[in-house]
């Protein structure tokens, strides 16, 4: 079971928790349900930007349910991905 918190910034530029869900599956269908339910609770107003990790199922669900929202990847996950793929270059003096 995964925890899926919705954390964002309100109209006063304050951090806040918009909601939280526990999902038994990380499938695209589960995320579609989650994002549809979130939008319903927000009166149908889509977030301007949505930041997630690189889970393919979330990417698919966001494109389908929140097509007008900019989807960005979390900076920490990008750094981890770069480190795992480019880490060998770290000690390369010619790079």
Image: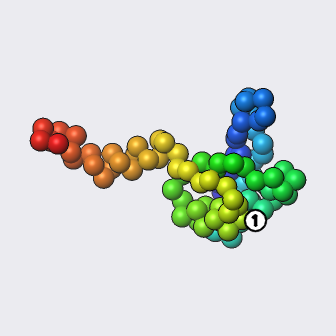
- Residue 3 in sight: no
Q: Residues within 10 Å of mark 1 (few under 14, many from 20)?
A: few
- Residue 69 in sight: yes
Q: Secondary structure at mark 1?
A: helix
Quickly name the residue at label 1: 33
The mark tally for this picture is 1
Asked if residue 63 is positioned above or below residue 95 in the image, the reply reads: below
Q: Which residue occupies 64% across, 50% down?
A: 50
**In the image, residue 28 lies at what x, y percent?**
64, 68
Apparent side of residue 91 relative to residue 31 in the rendered image (left or right): left
Asked if residue 42 is positioned above or below residue 29 in the image, the reply reads: above
How are the colours assigned in the image?
rainbow
Q: Which quadrant, please, contains the C terminus?
A: top left
Apparent side of residue 2 relative to residue 42 in the rendered image (left or right): left
Asked if residue 68 is positioned above or below residue 42 in the image, the reply reads: below
Dividing the picture into quadrants, the one containing residue 55 is: bottom right
Q: Which residue occupies 54% across, 64% down?
A: 56
């Amino acid at each position: 079971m995964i925890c899926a918190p919705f954390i964002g910034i309100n109209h006063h530029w304050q951090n806040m928790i918009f909601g939280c869900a526990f999902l038994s599956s990380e499938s695209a269908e589960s995320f579609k349900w989650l994002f549809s339910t979130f939008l319903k609770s927000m009166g149908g107003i889509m977030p301007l930007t949505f930041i997630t990790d690189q889970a393919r199922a979330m990417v698919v669900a966001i494109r389908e349910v929140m097509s007008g929202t900019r989807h960005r990847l979390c900076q920490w996950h990008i750094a981890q991905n770069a480190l795992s793929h480019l880490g060998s270059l770290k000690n390369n003096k010619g790079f």
